[in-house]
Image (spheres, helix red, strand yellow):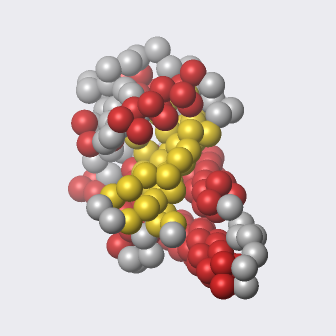
Amino acid sequence: MIRKGVFWGTILAVFALVTYVGLSSGAEEAGGEACISPEEVADYVHTVIEADRTLYTKLVVQRMQDHGKVIASQHWKGRGQLPLPAQMLLLAGLEVEGMGTGLKYRLASLWPLEEENGPATDFERTGLQVVADDPSEVYAGTIKRGKLRYFKAIYADKAVSKACVECHNGHLLSPRRDYKLNDVMGGVIVSFPVQ
């Protein structure tokens, strides 16, 4: 059931991206403007990611833990447990990246539990600081990787459940232990190729 939600969310995100690329290509050929901006595409993708993650957190993880059925754990694979919501988002992001569309998304933080979840570039570091200072802001722009141009957007990632807060505040590797519900913990980074 969880995989179906991630699958359909991914399909919707890819559809939005393909629609954007198709409409912008057709609009350019017809001499018109693109109908969907990269900002709108990123917002659509982010909306699907957030909806999937919030529902997984509240309807699966929190519910199962409240009923004492299954525990979500960082070491879920070897213990027959559920992936943490952040891990589920990262796993889905890797799955989407593997589909070869150029769409990528991941979590990152200025206070990561794992080093690989920190900012990878100055753009990401600046964006994470912007959304930490003002969660209503989206830090976005066009970047270059080799000869290709990508649109990249960073959205605030908030602690949406007590499980998020408890995990980060109690984790041995956590550089920060004072999170409260709805605090910004980092950012969701969405990127895709643009022409």
Left or right of 154 on screen, residue 168? left
| Residue 25 x, y percent position in the rendering | 62, 80
Q: Compared with residue 117, is residue 4 higher up or lower down, i.e. above or below?
A: below
What residue sits 48% from the left and 63% below the top? 192
Residue name at image x 36 percent, y 44 percent? 73
| Viewer-side residue, 159 vs 84 | 159
Q: Position of residue 5 (x, y in %)?
A: 59, 68
* Residue depicted at 59% across the width and 76% down the height: 21
Point out the image quarter for the N terminus. Answer: bottom right
Q: Is residue 111 visible?
A: yes
The picture places residue 175, in percent across and down from the top left corner, at 32, 20
Observer-nearest of 76 and 38: 38
82 in relation to 139, above or below: below
Q: Give the quarter of the image for residue 60.
A: bottom right
Q: Quadrant of residue 14?
A: bottom right
| Residue 167 shown left or right of residue 74 in the figure | right
Check the image and report above or below for 69 versus 41.
above
- Looking at the image, which residue sits at the far front? 31
75 vs 137, nearest the viewer: 137
